[in-house]
Amino acid sequence: MRPGEIVAEGLAPPAGPVLRFVGRIRTPWGPGECPKNIGKARETGRGARVELDPAFAPALLGLEIGQPVVLLYWLHEARRDLLRQSPRHIDGTRGTFALRSPNRPNSIGLATVRITALDGAAGTLGIDAIDCFDGTPLLDIKPWLERVDLPPAP
């Protein structure tokens, strides 16, 4: 370990591939009322928050209000068996990997959001918006970095 690094107590590295939920996303949305994408969620003006498991609160160090971050979350109520889908907003059918639908073999959601509030001691982040159900399990938070996250020019 390097100087200044700390580890979460009782969280030994798992044997083999395992997903560990680090918290939950709190939203005003439930089934039947959730916006279909983050753009629609932003239009509502209704923000959301991230609540980390207390063991992961120290991992917020270095984040700032106003900063964009990428959230990876587990869409726990989505189907996992659709290979082709016919969304209402698109004419025709597309392969699941050509869509941002929650219905996919591994139901991992991804959203770039902006931090609106930050309480490192409590392990909470306010975020501008998100399009998932209240209580959605959070997998990870990563800083959005222009030099890394913008694709190269064609």
Image (cartoon, grey):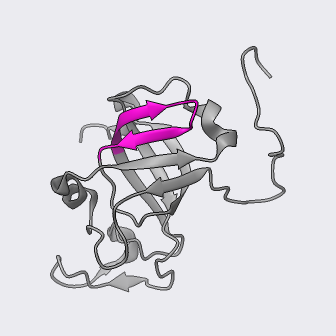
Position in image of residue 101 (x %, y %): 35, 71
* Percent position of residue 19, x then y: 67, 59
- Above/below status of 116 relative to 77: above
Left/right placement of residue 121 relative to residue 17 reads left
Residue closest to the eye, 143 or 45? 45
- Looking at the image, the residue that sits furthest to the front is 122
As drawn, 51 above or below 97:
above
Q: Residue at x 73, y 22 (%)?
A: 5
Q: Quadrant of the C terminus?
A: top left
- Picture quarter with the N terminus: top right
Residue at 40 percent across and 71 percent down: it is 102
In the displayed orientation, state which residue is furthest to the top.
Answer: 3
Residue extent of the magenta highlight: 113-128
Give the image quarter of residue 3. Answer: top right
**In the image shown, does 103 or 132 lie closer to the viewer?**
132
Horizontal side, residue 84 vs residue 62: left or right? left
Q: Is residue 63 left or right of residue 100?
A: right
Residue 109 shown in magenta: no
Task: Write the residue at 36% across / 43% down.
Answer: 127
Q: Main secondary structure of the magenta part?
A: strand
At a point 55% along the width and 31% down the height, the residue shown is 60
